[in-house]
Image: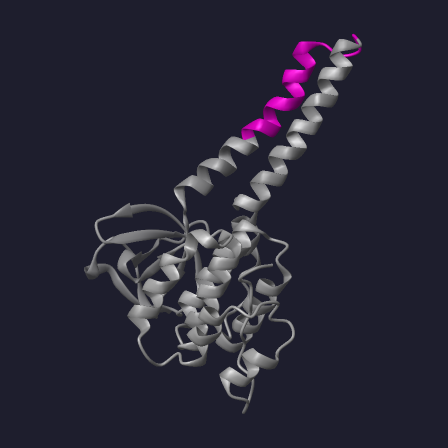
Amino acid sequence: MNGYWSGKKCGEMSRRAYLRDNKSMQVDDKFWVNLVSNPDSGHEEKLSGLLSINSALKDEVFFNNVGVYYEQIGEHARAKAFYLKSLSENVLNMQTWKNLLSLQHQMGNESELLNLTLFFLQSTSFLQVYFLLLTIILIKQYVRYKNESLSIKKIIQKMFPLYFILIILTFVNDGRYFYVINEKQSLHDGPSSIFQNDDEIKSGKMLLTSKKNNEFIKVIKLTSPGDNSWVRANGLIKL
């Protein structure tokens, strides 16, 4: 896949040697190789370069590459966010999965299985597959209707719940309710600094959120429905 690579840390090997020798790279794009060969200089210029070539790459490839760059300069929360963005575009991208799982291991984040599952259920990749399956089902129902073995009423009864789920998932996808914590911050019991409590949330933690109030966003904890936790919006990376 043109423009696709996945740089990872490699012990005592230099980044340049690793990028040259790693056969899983799949490309020899000089821009991307040079980008992580010298990650400690010119961050702003390099990021401007990334944005300028976005249109030349598939979204899943671009997001993965930006994630690798952020991982190389030590910004792991941002790297995780971009790996998730890449997988949202193509949940079957195995190279990005390797990057994400390796990063998760380094960061030592606790299990996020529930939030990850919900994130992928509303992802662009899943919505495309779901819509395709609905189309196939609808065509089959129409064939049965033409053969007079199924009424319009029964077709509507069968298809309405499936399309309702599609509408809900699309709404969540458009609203972008998932975030990654950029830097460790304190939790609050309400949307104000005066409600700060002693609990903290780690950098890189994935969150499902709901409403925003002033500079704060409410966190949805599916395992603790009655929990009333808020975080500062300016410390979040939107997925």
Can residue 204 be seen from the camera position used here? no
Q: Residue furthest top?
A: 148
Residue drawn at point x = 35 percent, y = 53 percent? 228
Tell me how the rendering is colored: one colour
Q: In the picture provided, is 111 more to the left or to the right than 231? A: right
Comparing 185 with 224, the one in front is 185
Q: Quadrant of residue 181?
A: bottom left
Q: Is residue 154 magenta?
A: yes
**Where is residue 189 shown, x and y percent of the image?**
30, 57
Which image quarter is the N terminus in?
A: bottom right
Q: Which residue lies furthest to the left in this view?
A: 194
Q: In the picture provided, is 124 more to the left or to the right than 189? A: right
Which segment did they paint magenta?
Answer: 148-164
**Where is residue 185 shown, x and y percent of the image?**
31, 68
Q: In which quarter of the image is residue 70?
A: bottom left
Residue drawn at point x = 56 percent, y = 40 percent? 127
In the rendered image, the vertical position of residue 121 relative to residue 33, given as above or below:
above
Residue drawn at point x = 25 percent, y = 63 percent? 196
Residue drawn at point x = 29 percent, y = 65 percent? 197
Q: Is residue 183 magenta?
A: no
Q: In the picture provided, is 52 more to the left or to the right than 8? A: left
**Where is residue 107 shown, x and y percent of the image?**
48, 75
Comparing 18 with 230, the one in front is 18
Can residue 14 be seen from the camera position used here? yes
In the rendered image, the vertical position of residue 62 relative to residue 125, given as above or below:
below
Give the main secondary structure, helix, strand or loop, of the magenta stretch. Answer: helix
Image mark count: 0
